[in-house]
Image: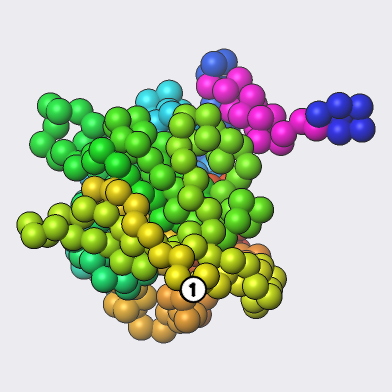
């Protein structure tokens, strides 16, 4: 179609196929007879759900361990309702996985409630798939970052999406703020900004590079602009200003200019001397990326991680450096997309199947 008009988005085609399957109650193929092998899956996000579903179809006895009280991982706590309806889409997909015979245990923090070694030695699991995501937020380390009114995007979105902070009837409110500054330019920053706007705030996105370098999808930036979000580009925070009660009262920023390309190939932002000024804000949301929580890797001997705390795993089959342990999704790649996490879940299921058959 791109030769004759606008190209067709593959995402829209996938959405149509998925919606069609839901509307016509098309179910996954029923699982084979149980083969007697137990597999544990850590995390009920897109990677864990995909891996668990594929293994169940092949007859494995699968148990998914979820740290939170609700299933779905980033699909539930990270992506806002207006982008991914929870009841209409996520809950129905989870129900399909349950129908395949997969068991779920919530409020289980692997590395604290129990360990991977205990899953093998005490609970009889023969393989483990780690799909625990990347939920550890990064901060800038600037003065005032510990003030009341400073959030990571993870916390802000989790409070709004999972804990219903927007609803006054819930016991988990959030300080919505009147003037919100979101620091960062990725898809998560756009989600946080659009949620803040829905909570009634005037929202600025503060990003140190130009619009050309914005890592968020063009569609997300377009939607944010349509909803009235202001972009302060080539701007970088220097300090969060705090009042006498410890609350955010503003943010000192500096104007930037693009210099020579850095190791990533993008032009390096450099401060323009004497260009500091203040933004009026009472809430700052840091959306600078995330890394995997080191809880699992630090409590599992023989499980190697790289310098970004991501688990080292084979891309083709998810095999880690520890025998019988496989991993995929954001726990391996760092924060990425839902579809890449699902692909890793499929690769992990294939790897576990081959491993147990050869064993």
Residue 257 is inside the magenta segment: no
The outermost residue toward the bottom is 302
| Start-end of magenta stretch | 7-22
Q: Residue at x 53, y 43 (%)?
A: 57
- In the rendered image, the quadrant that contains the C terminus is bottom right
Query: Is 109 above or below relative to 264?
Result: above
Q: Would residue 203 be seen by someone viewing this image from the given angle?
A: yes
Quadrant housing residue 183? bottom left
Query: Is 43 above or below relative to 93?
Result: below
Residue annotated with mark 1: 273
Residue 11 is inside the magenta segment: yes
**Secondary structure beneath label 1:** loop
Image-based side of 205 in relation to 249, left or right: right
Residue 103 in picture, x, y percent from top left: 34, 44
Q: Main secondary structure of the magenta part?
A: helix
Q: Residues within 10 Å of mark 1 (few under 14, many from 20)?
A: few
């Amino acid at each position: 179609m791109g030769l004759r008009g606008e190209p067709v988005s593959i995402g829209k085609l996938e959405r149509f196929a998925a919606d069609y399957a839901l509307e016509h109650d098309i179910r996954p193929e029923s699982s084979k007879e149980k083969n007697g092998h137990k597999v544990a899956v850590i995390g009920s996000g897109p990677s864990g759900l995909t891996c668990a579903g594929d293994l169940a179809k092949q007859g494995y006895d699968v148990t998914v361990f979820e740290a939170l009280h609700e299933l779905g991982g980033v699909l539930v706590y990270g992506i806002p309702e207006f982008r991914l309806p929870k009841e209409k889409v996520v809950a129905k997909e989870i129900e399909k996985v349950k129908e395949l015979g997969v068991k779920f245990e919530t409020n289980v923090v692997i590395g604290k409630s129990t360990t991977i070694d205990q899953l093998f030695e005490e609970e009889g699991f023969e393989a483990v798939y780690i799909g625990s995501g990347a939920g550890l937020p990064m901060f800038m380390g600037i003065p005032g970052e510990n003030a009341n009114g400073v959030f990571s995007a993870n916390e802000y979105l989790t409070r709004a999406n999972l804990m219903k902070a927007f609803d006054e009837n819930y016991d988990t409110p959030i300080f919505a703020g009147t003037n919100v500054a979101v620091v960062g330019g990725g898809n998560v920053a756009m989600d946080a900004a659009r949620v803040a706007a829905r909570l009634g705030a005037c929202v600025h996105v503060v990003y140190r590079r130009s619009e050309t370098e914005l890592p968020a999808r063009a569609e997300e930036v377009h939607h944010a602009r349509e909803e009235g979000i202001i972009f302060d580009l080539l701007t970088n925070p220097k300090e969060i200003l705090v009042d006498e009660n410890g609350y955010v009262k503003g943010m000192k920023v500096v104007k930037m200019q693009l210099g020579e390309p850095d190791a990533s190939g993008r032009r390096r932002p450099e401060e323009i001397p004497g260009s500091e000024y203040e933004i009026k804000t009472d809430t700052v949301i840091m959306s600078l990326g995330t890394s995997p929580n080191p809880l699992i890797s630090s409590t599992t001997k023989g499980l190697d991680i790289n310098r970004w705390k991501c688990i080292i795993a084979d891309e083709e089959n998810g095999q880690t450096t520890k025998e019988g342990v496989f991993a995929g999704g954001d726990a391996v790649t760092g924060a990425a997309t839902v579809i890449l996490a699902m692909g890793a879940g499929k690769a992990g299921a294939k790897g576990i199947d081959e491993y147990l058959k050869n064993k």
